[in-house]
């Protein structure tokens, strides 16, 4: 059976871990199956939330909010002969609007100390809030992980995430677009539009390959679109940016899909808030 748009918690030899509990996450235990020889672990951190568009009276200079950065992706293939019988997993939550995500980790104990880590994937940073003088900065991508003390037990690799799009100019401009698929299957969020006296559209999430494009919020305060989510193969995108509205409320940024950045909010009399960053996850597959 195919689960293209939804991967169950248990699918064949693969188990999926999602964020659990508080915003800082809770550890979940994974018991290594009897007879397993190799484990493949894929970890994706939480995406960064988008920044807010600036709020001010009609005719004022207002920058759009920046899109959140996507998380990094890390992978390790490890012989079970070198592992204890139980591993501990923390799947990082996506960031609230204006907040960074949480990194995802697999550890020898329920503790995120580097000296205990087998795998970790860094989170995306939040997009900046627009202001009267500047656009909201693009959220930084999750950095490549150096791994932990036990990463070298297997074939560890880490790939940096994608930066979000900056907000639209204070004089009035569309938000900066982001293109999916440069080097990783997650993306940053697009920027929200700026405004002084005109209305502008939010930044587009430009699709490629299996990922469709997501239009930005319409000029006049339209909300950004939520990110695209496909599990087979994993294909996730950030949210698009909110549109600006000179004499009304700016549009909210779209929420990011798994591990992706939220879109930036559009400027307005009341600026739109950024979209939430997408939750991270961890996949553990028995290869043999």
Image (cartoon, rainbow, N blue to C red):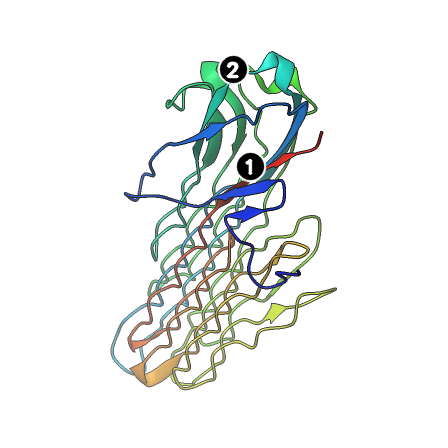
- Res 206 label: none
Mark 2 vs mark 1: give the one in front.
Answer: 2
Q: Which residue is drawn at the image coordinates 64% and 23% (left, top)? A: 35
Whether 150 is drawn above or below 146: the answer is: above
Q: Nearer the viewer, residue 70 or 81?
A: 81
Q: Please tell me whether mark 2 sits on a helix, a strand or a loop.
A: loop
Neighbour class for label 1 at 10 Å: few (<14), some, many (≥20)?
many
Residue 228, located in which quarter of the rendered image?
A: bottom right
Mark sitting earlier along the chain (2/1): 2
Specify whether 224 is left or right of 75. left
Callout 2–callout 1 Cβ contact below 8 Å: no
**Which label sits on residue 84?**
2
Q: Position of residue 184 (x, y in %)?
A: 67, 49
Q: Say the numbered circle drawn on residue 143.
A: 1
| Residue 70: % across, % down | 53, 50
SS for callout 1: loop
Q: Nearer the viewer, residue 170 or 140?
A: 140
Residue 130: image location, x then y, percent: 37, 62
Q: Toward the viewer: 239 or 140?
A: 239
Whole-Å distance between the Cαs marked 2 and 1? 28 Å
Residue positioned 71% across, 29% down in the render: 288
């Amino acid at each position: 059976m195919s689960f293209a748009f939804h991967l169950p918690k248990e699918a064949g030899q693969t188990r999926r871990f999602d964020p659990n509990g508080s915003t800082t996450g809770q550890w979940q235990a994974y018991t290594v199956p009897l007879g397993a020889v190799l484990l493949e672990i894929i970890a994706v951190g939480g995406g960064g939330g988008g920044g807010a568009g600036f709020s001010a009276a009609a005719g004022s200079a207002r920058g759009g909010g920046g899109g959140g950065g996507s998380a990094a992706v890390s992978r390790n293939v490890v012989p079970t002969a070198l592992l204890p019988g139980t591993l501990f997993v923390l799947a990082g939550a996506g960031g609230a609007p204006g907040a960074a995500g949480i990194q995802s980790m697999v550890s020898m104990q329920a503790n995120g100390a580097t000296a205990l880590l087998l795998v970790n994937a860094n989170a995306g940073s939040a997009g900046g809030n627009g202001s009267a003088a500047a656009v909201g900065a693009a959220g930084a991508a999750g950095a490549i992980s150096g791994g932990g003390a036990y990463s070298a037990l297997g074939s560890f690799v880490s790939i940096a995430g994608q930066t979000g799009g900056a907000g639209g100019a204070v004089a009035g401009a569309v938000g900066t677009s982001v293109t999916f698929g440069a080097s990783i299957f997650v993306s940053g969020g697009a920027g929200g539009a700026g405004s002084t006296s005109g209305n502008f559209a939010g930044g587009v999430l430009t699709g490629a390959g299996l990922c469709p494009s997501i239009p930005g919020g319409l000029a006049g305060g339209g909300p950004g679109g939520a990110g695209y989510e496909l599990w087979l193969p994993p294909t996730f995108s950030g949210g698009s940016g909110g549109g600006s509205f000179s004499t009304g409320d700016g549009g909210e940024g779209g929420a990011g899909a798994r591990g992706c950045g939220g879109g930036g909010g559009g400027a307005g009399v009341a600026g739109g808030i950024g979209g939430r960053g997408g939750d991270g996850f961890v996949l553990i597959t028995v290869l043999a």
